[in-house]
Image (cartoon, grey):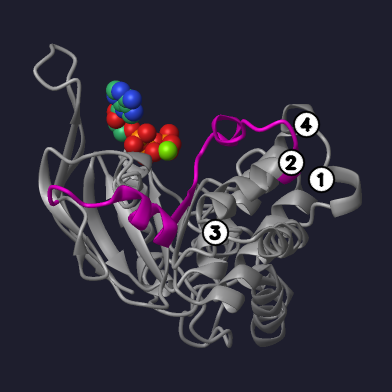
Amino acid sequence: MTIRVEHLTHTYNKGLAYETKAVDDVSFEVADGEFIGVVGHTGSGKSTLIQHLNGILKPDAGRIWIGDIDITAKGVKMHEIRKRVGMSFQYPEYQLFEETVYKDIAFGPRNLGLADDEIDERVREAMSLVNLKFDEMAERSPFELSGGQKRRAAIAGVIAMRPEVLILDEPTAGLDPKAHADILSMINSVRERMGGIVILVSHNMDDIAATTSRVFVMDTGRLVRAGAPAEVFSDAGYMRGVGLGLPQATEMAAMLGLDGEPGAGVGAAAGETAPGTILDMDGLVDAIVSARIARGPDAIDGTPRGEEDRNGATRDEKGVGE
Ligand SMILES: Nc1ncnc2c1ncn2[C@@H]1O[C@H](COP(=O)(O)OP(=O)(O)OP(=O)(O)O)[C@@H](O)[C@H]1O
Ligand SMILES: [Mg+2]
């Protein structure tokens, strides 16, 4: 399964004074097995873009192929597409509507016409993947769940369809650190289990860096950059220019001047200028330790390289790093 999008444009409220071009001439291809991260400032068109991939939204212009089916062509059976492309929305409460969590998760598989025992197996598997305890949760009303539990139930409903493309729009927004980590590990286990394509929309650059194989950067409706996380996140200036940050550890490494300068002994840690690996928090700690060993205890004084400290001396003038 592959995805191909050509010159996709979507305008809300077309012809009205307040029309918005939410997606503007976007083209890309996704190969089978890719894990795509979609990032972009709020209102940059991420949700609008992905909602075209299973036909929820129709483009004003452009074409979309899911595998070898042009889903923008007339007469395409949308339920065939939705079987293959599963989407969990940014606001999961819109996705839950049955009396019980069980029925909700079973809804999709039931529509596929599966037998009861197959449905049961899928519901149990999906609940276990999203870490919802079957005995406690299956018979509860989805409307009584907490925000994080609703999110998991909604995602379970999508997973239970076993789609070839799994699209998750902000699945971790507003969750506590434990629930957040659970959802991320769930995404990884689902990916291992089902293969296929995963598309993760997120404002959390750490999640994107930790999970995805390619990152799409959206800016005011346009797809302005696509590349490996290490490549995209090595250009801090560009990311700031489109209203985005870097993964936290990468940001800190750059602030501390641990971005792979010669002699630092930290190798090619990521930073404003250094192309290279993206640091996670463990990597940052290692880089700090290595820098302290290589450069002595003054190695990290919080003064970004080249910037003056309170005494007017730059890090280089002080001889740090030599
Ligand atoms: N149903 C709608 N009707 C009219 N305009 C809309 C609608 N949904 C989104 N828009 C507008 O389209 C643009 C893109 O919105 P979209 O929700 O796709 O952005 P996003 O990148 O997902 O933002 P966020 O990060 O806040 O979720 C915005 O200007 C938004 O105001
Ligand atoms: Mg959105």
C-alpha span from label 2 to label 4: 6 Å
The reply to whether the C-beta atoms of the residues labelled 1 and 2 are less than 8 Å apart is: yes
Percent x, y of residue 43? 35, 33
> Could you give the CA–CA distance between mark 4 and mark 1, rounded to whole angstroms?
8 Å
Give the residue at mark 3: 161
* Nearest to the observer: residue 248 or residue 67: 67
Mark 1 lies on residue: 138
Quadrant in which the N terminus is drawn = bottom left
Confirm or reject: label 2 Cβ below 8 Å from ligand 2: no
- Residue at 52% in and 49% down: 111
Nearer-N-terminus badge (1/2)? 2
User: In this orientation, which residue lies closer to the viewer: 175 or 108?
Assistant: 108
- From mark 1 to mark 2, how far is it between C-alphas? 5 Å
Q: Are marks 2 and 4 in contact (CB under 8 Å)?
A: yes
Viewer can see residue 198: no
Label 3 neighbourhood size at 10 Å, few (<14), some (14-19), many (20+)?
Answer: many
Q: Nearer the viewer, residue 26 or 50?
A: 50
Q: Residue at x 68, y 67 (%)?
A: 281
- Name which quarter of the figure residue 19 lies in: top left
- Determine whether 169 is above or below 141 in the image: below
Badge 4 density bin: few <14, some 14–19, many ≥20, Cα 10 Å: some
Q: Which mark is residue 141?
A: 4
Say what amino acid the circle numbered 4 marks: Ser
Relative to residue 78, is residue 285 drawn left or right?
right
Q: Name the mark on residue 101.
A: 2
Q: Which residues are magenta?
A: 73-102
Confirm or reject: label 4 Cβ below 8 Å from ligand 2. Answer: no
The tag earlier along the polypeptide, 2 or 3, is 2
Element at badge 2? helix
- Residue lying at the far right in this picture: please name it: 135
In the rendered image, residue 285 lying in the magenta stretch gets the answer no
Of label 1 and label 3, which has the lower sequence position?
A: 1
